[in-house]
Image: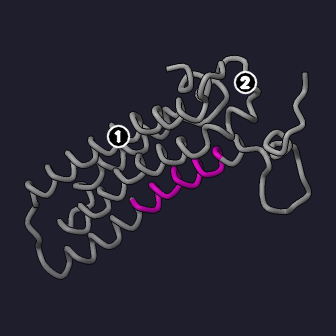
Amino acid sequence: MESNTPSDRETEDSPSGAGPSDPLLSLQIVWVALLLSLGIYAVIAYTVAKQVANGAQLAPLPAMQMAFAMISLSSVTVAYVLSRKLLKQAIGTDDPATLPVAKLARLAFTPWILRMAMTESVGIFGLLMAMLTGQPSSGLPFLIVSALVMLTHLPNEKALRTAAQQ
């Protein structure tokens, strides 16, 4: 039986001009934008850190690097735990395997955005580390970890269903 409630009609294409009506496509667009931002952070880190280093030699900050590493690890952990909890709450008693992909993507939208934003924050810590030390290489591990985690979690139907069933 097909439902025609307002929430189901939201997934249909509409000429509203408000952007993609497919929530999965919207998630993928945000994913690409956040992934590209990591590349921009790397360019900024290299450019700014080199300019800072030319002015004065800054000492590495091992305590700050350790603190950023711990915060980054916490951020990635919380991102997955919290997004999983929010996704379970959004799905409720529905079976993720039988939900239409548009509905599943709509339900997973906020938890997945939260997950991606918190994962991207690791890259921001890398940018900060490079700027504080004047050494672009000090931020590189943070940017790499952030990019790898993002690359392993492309928002597609299979990933959404897997996350919803965990």
Identify residue for label 1. Answer: 78
Examine the rendered structure and indicate whether residue 149 appears above or below residue 142: above
Could you tell me which residue is drawn at 28 percent across and 64 percent down?
128
Q: What amino acid type is highlighted by mark number 1?
A: Val
Distance Cα–Cα, label 2 vs label 1: 26 Å
Secondary structure type for disc 2: loop
Task: Tell whether position 94 is magenta.
Answer: no
Q: Which mark is residue 127?
A: none
Mark 2 or mark 1, earlier in chain: 1
Q: Is residue 125 left or right of residue 67?
A: right
Q: Residue 44: image x %, image y %?
A: 39, 68
> What segment carries the magenta color?
27-41
- Which residue is depicted at the point 32% across and 73% down? 48
State the image quarter where residue 74 is shown: top left
Residue that extends furthest to the bottom in the rendered view of this protein: 55
Q: Which residue is mark 2?
A: 99
- Main SS of the magenta segment? helix
From the viewer's side, name the closer residue of 103 and 29.
103
Q: How many marks?
A: 2
> Residue at image x 11%, y 73%?
57
Where residue 47 appears, as percent x and y from the top left, is: 35, 71
Q: Nearer the viewer, residue 59 or 163?
A: 163
Q: Under tag 1, what secondary structure?
A: helix
Q: Amino acid at mark 2?
A: Leu
- Residue 135 in the image, given as x and y percentages of width and height: 21, 62
Between residues 128 and 67, which one lies in front from this camera angle? Answer: 67
